[in-house]
Image (tube, grey):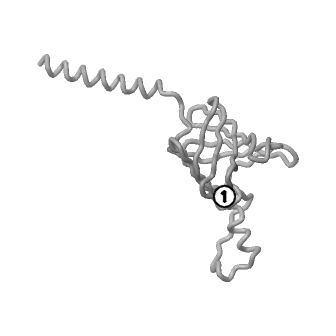
Amino acid sequence: MCRVFNSILAVTAVGAMGGFALESRSPSIEGVWRASEITLTGPGARTISPVQPNLAIITAKHYSRLEIHADYARPNLADASKASADELRQVWGPVVAEAGTYETSDGKLLTLHAVVAKNPATMQPGSFSTYAYRLAGDTLWLTLQRDQRGPVTNPPTIKLTRVE
């Protein structure tokens, strides 16, 4: 009986320590995220919510993001081979697709380096995008700070919610 009790006590203690380790772990940007709000600054400043479909995945060293940057629902193409240039731009122009590596610094900055992207310019050597970030629970705010051209005037802020 005493052995059973000691085993239960040991399992409970290990479980409690495991829970403590999870609770004491620092928050992480790793996960699957969905943008829920975008705040634009400068001329034409506004907040967009809800936003078009999007998904960002951040692992220990890599990221992937797929977003629709449009204020309208994209039309369906019955036959892309017969679509006009304007129809193709309406459907595919707003799509942002990018994946690559990232690093964080000072616990406040996130710098993305695209390895593959819909826009080839973002894959050029030396290209990057740096965001200030803030994480609170399952909410992540990203504010674009600079890219290879220099500081960003009127930076947008993206509010993301953890999906997984």
Q: Quadrant of the N terminus?
A: top left
Crowding near the residue tagged with mark 1, few <14, some 14–19, many ≥20 C-alpha atoms within 10 Å:
some
* Tag count: 1
Residue at the image position 57 percent from the left and 45 percent from the top: 33
Which one is nearer the viewer's eye here, 50 or 137? 137
Residue sticking out furthest to the right: 43
Residue at the image position 73 percent from the left and 42 percent from the top: 144
Image vertical order of residue 101 relative to residue 109, above or below: below
x, y percent for residue 123: 66, 56
x, y percent for residue 113: 63, 48
Residue at image mark 1: 96
Residue at the image position 68 percent from the left and 67 percent from the top: 92
Image vertical order of residue 29 relative to residue 26, above or below: below
Residue at the image position 15 percent from the left and 22 percent from the top: 4
x, y percent for residue 120: 68, 61
Instruction: Report the amino acid beneath label 1.
Output: Val
Q: Is residue 64 visible?
A: yes
Residue sticking out furthest to the left: 1
Residue sticking out furthest to the top: 2
| Left or right: 47 as drawn, with respect to 24 | right
Image vertical order of residue 46 relative to residue 86, above or below: above
Q: Is residue 55 visible?
A: no
| Left or right: 6 as drawn, with respect to 88 | left
Residue sticking out furthest to the front: 125
x, y percent for residue 116: 60, 57
Quadrant of the rendered image containing residue 111 = top right
Which one is nearer the viewer's eye here, 138 or 148? 148
Say which element carries label 1: strand
Quadrant of the rendered image containing residue 10 = top left
